Image (spheres, helix red, strand yellow):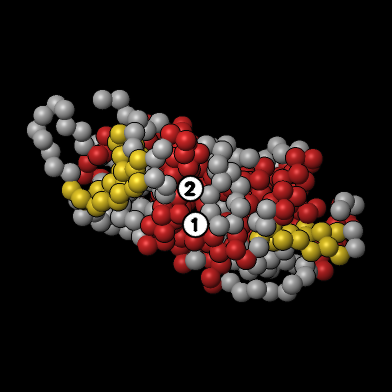
C-alpha cells in the first residue's frame, strides 16, 4: 500500500505555538533565519542585537537589506522580537514568551536521539470525524498532528509511536472539533496481506534518504572544522544551516522504533554529525557575530552548545538590562545605518 505520508508535506507554510513564531518551512525564510540567528547568540544571556548587525548577518545568507528589514519588522509586530530605540538606532531581542518557547523547542531538538531508545511497543492512535463544513478545523488538526510527529495511517486515523504528554493532549483538545478519540495500544498482526502495520504510515525510505543526505553533506565539513579553517561568515552560515536542517528530524522521525527500521538506521550518526558541526563552530561563529554587533566587547553575545540547549537555555539565563549596551550604538555609528 502506498503511504499517505508525504515527506514534503511536513513543512507547509504554517504557524504553530503560543508566540507567533515564523512559518516553518523546508527553506530558510528571512524570518526563520532571523529567529535562528537571534536565538543562537542571544538566548543564553538575553542579549540585544542592533538592527545594523542583524541586517548584514542576514545578508550573509543572501537576504537583501530590504527583505531583512521587512522580516525584522514583521517579527516585532508578531511579538517574537522586542525593540529598544535610542536616538536613531534600534536593537532587538527575543520577547520572553518567544525565548521560552524556543528554549523548550531547543530542549526537544537537543534531546532527540541523545539517550537510549525506550519504546513500550504501543502506538498512539488519533481518530476523528468532522463535518464537511469544518474543513478549516480539519486542516488545522492535521497540521497539529504532523508537527507533533503523527502520520496518517488512513485518512482520519493518525499514529505515532510516542505517547502524548499532558501539554500536547491539551493542544490537541484545543484543535479538536466534531468527534475525536485518542487511544494508546499495541498493533495486533493479522497475518494476512491486508494487514497494515502502523509504521507503514511513515515514508521510512524517504526519511532514511534525508538522513543520508544530511550525514554526507555535513561530514565533509568536519575536517575543516577540526583544523579551525571555518571562520567568520562561513562559520555562522554553516552553524545556522545545520540547525535549520537538523531540527526537522524530530518531526519526520518521532523516534520510530529502531527494531522496526531497516538495518543501520542513520539517526544516531546524524545526531553525532549535528553536534560536531554545531558545537565545533560555536567559537568562531560567536566571534564573528560579536565583531559585527559592536566595536567594543560584547560578552553577552554568547553561543550555546547542544548540551546547554538540552538543559534549557532560556531557563538558565536571566533578564538583563532593559536597554542595549553602549557598544551597539558605536556599531551603528560606525556603519552609518539605523
- Position above or below: 270 against 133: below
Residue 298 occupies which quadrant of the picture?
bottom right
282 left or right, relative to 321: left
Quadrant for the N terminus, please.
Answer: top left
Image x and y of residue 29, in percent: 63, 40
Determine which residue is flagged by label 1.
105
272 left or right, relative to 92: left
- Position above or below: 232 against 323: above
Residue 270 occupies which quadrant of the picture?
top left
Image x and y of residue 32, in percent: 62, 46
Front residue (pair 146, 110): 146
200 left or right, relative to 210: left
Residue at screen point 44% across, 44% down: 141
Image x and y of residue 258, in percent: 25, 45
- Closer to the chain start, of discs 2 and 1, is 1
Q: Residue furthest left?
A: 191
Front residue (pair 159, 233): 159
* Label 1, residues with CA under 10 Å away: few <14, some 14-19, many ≥20: some
Q: Secondary structure at mark 2?
A: loop
Foreground label between 2 and 1: 1
Label ID, residue 247: 2
Residue at screen point 45% across, 54% down: 174
Amino acid at each position: 500500500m502506498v503511504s499517505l505520508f508525504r515527506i514534503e508535506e511536513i513543512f507547509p507554510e504554517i504557524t504553530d505555538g503560543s508566540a507567533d513564531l515564523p512559518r516553518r518551512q523546508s527553506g530558510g525564510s528571512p524570518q526563520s533565519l532571523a529567529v535562528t540567528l537571534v536565538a543562537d547568540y542571544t538566548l543564553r544571556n538575553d542579549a540585544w542585537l542592533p538592527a545594523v548587525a542583524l541586517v548584514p548577518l542576514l545578508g550573509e545568507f543572501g537576504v537583501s537589506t530590504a527583505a531583512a528589514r521587512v522580516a525584522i519588522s514583521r517579527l516585532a509586530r508578531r511579538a517574537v522580537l522586542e525593540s529598544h530605540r535610542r536616538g536613531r538606532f534600534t536593537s532587538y531581542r527575543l520577547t520572553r514568551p518567544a525565548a521560552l518557547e524556543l528554549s523548550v523547542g531547543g530542549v526537544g531538538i537537543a534531546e532527540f536521539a541523545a539517550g537510549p531508545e525506550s519504546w513500550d511497543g504501543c502506538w498512539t492512535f488519533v481518530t476523528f470525524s468532522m463535518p464537511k463544513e469544518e474543513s478549516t478545523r480539519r486542516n488545522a488538526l492535521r497540521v497539529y498532528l504532523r508537527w507533533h510527529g503523527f502520520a496518517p495511517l488512513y485518512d482520519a486515523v493518525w499514529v505515532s509511536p510516542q505517547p502524548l504528554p499532558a501539554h500536547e493532549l491539551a493542544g490537541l483538545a484545543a484543535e479538536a472539533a466534531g468527534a475525536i478519540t485518542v487511544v494508546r495500544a499495541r498493533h495486533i498482526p493479522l497475518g494476512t496481506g491486508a494487514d497494515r502495520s502502523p509504521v507503514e504510515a511513515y515514508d521510512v525510505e524517504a526519511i532514511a534518504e534525508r538522513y543520508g543526505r544530511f550525514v554526507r553533506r555535513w561530514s565533509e565539513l568536519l575536517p575543516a572544522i577540526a583544523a579551525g579553517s571555518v571562520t567568520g561568515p562561513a562559520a555562522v552560515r554553516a552553524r545556522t544551516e545545520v540547525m535549520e536542517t537538523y531540527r526537522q528530524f524530530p518531526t519526520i522521525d518521532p523516534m520510530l522504533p529502531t527494531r522496526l527500521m531497516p538495518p543501520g538506521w542513520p539517526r544516531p550518526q546524524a545526531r553525532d554529525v549535528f553536534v560536531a558541526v554545531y558545537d565545533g563552530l560555536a567559537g568562531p561563529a560567536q566571534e564573528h557575530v560579536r565583531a559585527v554587533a559592536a566595536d567594543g566587547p560584547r560578552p553577552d553575545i554568547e553561543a550555546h552548545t547542544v548540551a546547554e540547549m538540552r538543559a534549557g537555555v532560556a531557563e538558565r539565563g536571566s533578564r538583563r538590562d532593559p536597554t542595549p549596551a553602549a557598544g551597539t550604538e558605536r556599531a551603528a555609528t560606525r556603519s552609518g545605518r539605523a
